[in-house]
Image: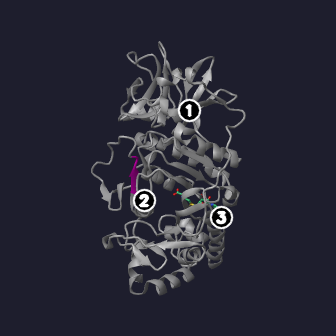
């Protein structure tokens, strides 16, 4: 599809002598990249080229069929374009890596930046991954479940619904819906939806989102703003506006060889300078007064806390069982929650209606425990549980939800693993097995080429 003339005219005037290089880059195929999950021990992509600004980022020489890679299903990596991984650098330079912070990812689906944040933050951090569009919640949850962390809550709200959490978060990320100019090469439809009016609409919507987001940051905290577009209406103008609302623009120090263009109000990746897609990002520090509110929080009234003496049943399944609190819901679902984050989870649970808090690790039925798929993928899983390490072919058949069975497999609950990464549960019986992979997780495509 030919690119819209007003877009090309603006890029020409913005880029000057670099414009022909920009056009030439748009003719090139988009680079393929992934980001490894550091909390899973992944052996894949050992020879792939590293992405300079992210230790877990790798460029792939071609696009594999990710659906046919069991490591992908195990949450061993996330397929993410390289420029967006610069968010880690903004985190590193503004709040530091490995810190225990309260973080809100306000426009989170499908979860690329949320998974990046979980890996960049300390394990004692608390992340709220919010997405306003309901149909995007399920893929967001699946991606977070694959990533395996138990310190994230998911919510399905408009940014304005967070008003009672004013001043609550150390970091708020607004990876805003935008006109998508930076994706024209990757996504042909993006150019078809573009118009000058759409840019204006996006800029106004971003302003509304940012205005709600700005209130949620505590004094001294950081607001991260990003888009995948090039124009100043959606990018620099919004950042400049924030700088007039009690925020200081944070200057980042990015090595020139990364190719990121430094603007007065942010950092821009162009495809002819950076090996990635078009991406804009900026970090701002809140200078305005904003005290962290005291919020009275409650355990949801239908939940029952499982008394300590009845928690033994989980010791076989979870490695640091003493670090978690356990609850049951009326239908028997068991929720695990890091003890240290109880208050944060219940604050979100108390103030937001559409949210999931805690990790659903299974069900208690007639005093026996049935583990969930979420637990199979979770980092809190006891690594000593019985497992069957599968060949790639077996793993793919398992992921098609076939019931595999071999005479020498240990009877009972067993993890199907590939390269030691859990894929899901099987219950092995005397002469057959049941595959507990949830139906909506199974591979639908044919395994044969
Ligand atoms: N951060 C995500 C990631 O890294 O995978 C991508 C986010 S995408 C650029 C922007 C998201 O904002 C979309 O999921 C979209 O549904 C959501 N969105 C759309 N309108 C919104 C609004 N008015 N307020 C907040 N979010 C909105």
What is the span of residues highlighted in magenta in the rendered image? 33-37
3D distance between C-alphas at marks 1 and 3? 33 Å
Disc number placed over residue 88 in the picture, else none: 2
User: Helix or strand or loop: what does disc 1 sit on?
Assistant: strand
Asked whether residue 278 is drawn in magenta, I would say no
3D distance between C-alphas at marks 2 and 1? 31 Å
Badge 2: residue crowd in 10 Å (few <14, some 14–19, many ≥20): many
Q: Which residue is mark 3?
A: 212
Q: Position of residue 37 (x, y in %)?
A: 40, 46
Q: Of marks 2 and 1, which one's residue comes earlier in the chain? A: 2
Colour basis: one colour
Q: Of marks 2 and 3, which one's residue comes earlier in the chain? A: 2
- Residue placed farthest to the top in the image? 430
304 and 218: which one is in front?
Answer: 218
Q: Which residue is mark 1?
A: 325
Q: Nearer the viewer, mark 2 or mark 3?
A: 3
Q: Nearer the viewer, mark 2 or mark 1?
A: 1
Residue behind label 3 places its C-beta within 8 angstroms of ligand 1: no
């Amino acid at each position: 599809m030919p690119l819209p003339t007003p877009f090309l005219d603006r890029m020409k005037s913005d880029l000057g002598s670099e414009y022909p290089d920009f056009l030439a880059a748009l003719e090139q195929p988009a680079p393929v990249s992934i980001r490894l999950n550091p909390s899973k021990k992944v052996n894949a992509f050992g020879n792939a080229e590293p992405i300079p600004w992210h230790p877990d980022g790798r460029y792939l020489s071609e696009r594999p069929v990710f659906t046919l890679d069991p490591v992908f299903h195990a949450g061993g990596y996330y397929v993410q374009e390289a420029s967006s991984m610069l968010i880690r650098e903004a985190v590193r330079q503004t709040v530091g890596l490995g810190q225990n912070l309260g973080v809100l990812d306000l426009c989170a689906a499908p979860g690329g930046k949320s998974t990046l944040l979980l890996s960049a933050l300390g394990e004692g951090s608390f992340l709220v991954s919010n997405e306003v569009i309901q149909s995007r919640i399920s893929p967001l949850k699946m991606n977070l479940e694959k990533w395996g962390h138990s310190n994230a809550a998911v919510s399905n709200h408009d940014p304005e619904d967070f008003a009672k959490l004013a001043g609550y978060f150390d970091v708020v990320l607004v990876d805003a819906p935008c006109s998508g100019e930076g994706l024209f090469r990757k996504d042909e439809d993006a150019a078809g939806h573009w118009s000058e009016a759409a840019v204006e609409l996006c800029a106004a919507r971003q302003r509304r989102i940012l205005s709600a987001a700005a209130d949620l940051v505590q004094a001294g905290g950081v607001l991260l703003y990003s888009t995948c577009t090039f124009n100043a209406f959606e990018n620099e103008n919004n950042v400049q506006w924030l700088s007039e609302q009690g925020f200081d623009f944070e200057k980042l120090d990015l090595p020139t060889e990364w190719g990121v263009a430094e603007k007065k109000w942010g950092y821009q990746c162009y495809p002819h300078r950076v090996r990635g897609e078009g991406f804009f990002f900026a970090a701002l520090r809140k200078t305005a007064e904003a005290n962290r509110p005291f919020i009275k929080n409650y355990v949801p009234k239908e939940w029952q806390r499982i008394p300590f003496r009845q928690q033994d049943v989980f010791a076989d399944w979870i490695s640091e069982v003493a670090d978690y609190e356990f609850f049951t819901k009326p239908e028997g679902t068991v929720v695990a929650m890091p003890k240290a984050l109880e208050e944060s989870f219940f604050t979100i649970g108390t103030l937001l209606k559409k949210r999931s808090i805690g990790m659903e690790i299974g069900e208690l039925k007639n005093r026996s425990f049935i583990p969930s798929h979420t637990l199979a993928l979770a980092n809190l899983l006891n690594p000593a549980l019985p497992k069957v390490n599968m060949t790639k072919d077996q793993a793919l058949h398992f992921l098609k939800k076939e019931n595999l069975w071999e005479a020498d497999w240990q009877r009972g609950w067993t993890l199907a693993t590939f390269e030691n990464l859990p894929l899901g549960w099987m219950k092995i019986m005397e002469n057959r097995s049941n595959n507990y992979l949830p139906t909506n997780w199974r591979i639908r495509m044919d395994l044969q080429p």
